[in-house]
Amino acid sequence: MEDILVMRSSEARRLHIIEQVIEKGLTQKQAAAHLGLTDRQIRRLKRRLLEEGERGLCHRSRGRPSNRRTDEKSKRQVLKIYQQEYAGFGPTRAAEKLSERNAIPLSDETLRLWLKAEGIAYPSRKKRPHRRWRQRRGQLGELLQMDGSHHDWLEGRGPWCVLMAYIDDATSRVYARFYEYEGTYPAMDSLRRYIQRDGVPLEVYIDKHSTYKSTAKQSEEQQLLDSKPMSQFQRSLQELAVEVIHADSPQAKGRIERLFRTFQDRLVKEMRLEKIASIEEANRFLEKYLPIYNRRFRVVPLKPGDLHRAAPPARELDRILCLKSERVLRKDWTISYEGKLYQIQKNIRAEKICVEEWLDGSLHLSHRGRSLPYTEILSRPLKVQPPSERNQTLKNSKPVADHPWRNFQFGRNRKRELAPNP
């Protein structure tokens, strides 16, 4: 009975047909037609069933070790390498690294079966909740998904850092760079590097982080102009003529969220093998890793062509991707910024001056797009008060005749406070 339970469906069907031949329900030619065999093979199967029982219909190699099996010594060597070097790797990634680094070709399914048989734990993908599928954009450069991922990328060998990543919606081509934090400077610097490499995209899909969307309230002037407050990064994208789309949830920009989940598994382990311990080393590693990753996982877009616009000149890009603010121009052609005083060296008629703080830390002043020469006033002259005014100030500082201080008496007031109420 146990043999019947472990028989495959094809073997069980063969058993049923041969039994019909023995019971004279079918002829040998009819059975051969049903099973796609010759009548000679039907006679062999009939003889096996009569002599050996149901086991005779099973394949002769059932239960025997395969002639193509890996020997036990090699298997133990692979499992030892896995536990020493690739602990925490999934079977697919571990099989890839065994082939790349150790010159051991092995299928991921074989390694998975070995790990399962030995009781060695390995990570597996969790089921993702179902969400409505969105069609990819048609061409390269049409939509760029952008975000930052806070994670212990260096696994304690270095500081916690943020991976600023960009993924093209049509092709899944990736660009990324590590920074100490997620803010305006990392966002602008990473975008500048992307634009200089690939060009200006048509649209950018980002979340509602305060770096990407201003949380300020609408001013009266903005209400009159029917405009909304923008963050520095939003303003830069507007000057680049890039349309901004803000996602209402992380799942809405699922392509880059899945990229971060992949990188938190694959990229972290790759940097662990290379013993990377600083942000600078991690960025140098990305320059080699990303081209390999893109060659393997990039997909073919629906339409050929590249919709990226050519990158602006470097100086123009500097003036766009920077921190901009306005300051009132005083009558002596000076402005105050961050507690410092600056002298404009050119007489101009303007109410306000634009202050640009570039990514390299330099400060630039401009008006209507034209740069203004300036110098910093390092020391301000002290205003000396004339003696006559100083003496007059001291005279005027005396209390008036009816001031409460003049009527205050220490002893009497103290006794009055201590006296009981009548």
Image: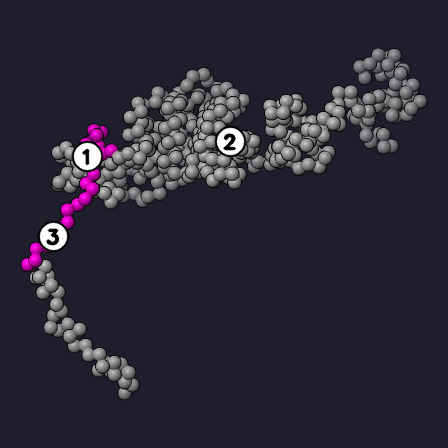
Residue where numbered disc 1 is placed: 374
Can you tell which mark lies on residue 264?
none
Q: Position of residue 367 (x, y in %)?
A: 20, 32
Q: Can residue 261 be seen in the rendering of this structure?
A: no
Q: Amino acid at mark 2?
A: Leu
Q: On the image, which quarter does residue 368 sit in?
A: top left
Residue 340 in the image, given as x and y percentages of width and height: 23, 43
Q: Residue at x 36, y 28 (%)?
A: 192
For the C terminus, the quadrant is bottom left
**Residue designated by label 3:** 384
Taking 191 as reference, is 357 left or right?
left
Q: Secondary structure at mark 2?
A: helix
Q: Earlier in the sequence, mark 2 or mark 3?
A: 2
Is 172 in front, or is 318?
318
Residue under label 2: 259
Q: Name the foreground residue: 359 vs 58.
A: 359
Structural crowding at the residue carrying mark 2, measured as other residues with C-alpha within 10 Å and reported as few (<14), some (14–19) or many (≥20) = some
Specify whether 134 is left or right of 48.
left
Whether residue 370 appears in magenta in the rendering, the answer is yes
User: Magenta segment: does it hold 290?
Assistant: no
Residues in magenta? 364-389
Secondary structure state at the residue bearing disc 1: strand
User: Tag 1: Cα neighbours inside 10 Å, few (<14), some, or many (≥20)?
Assistant: some
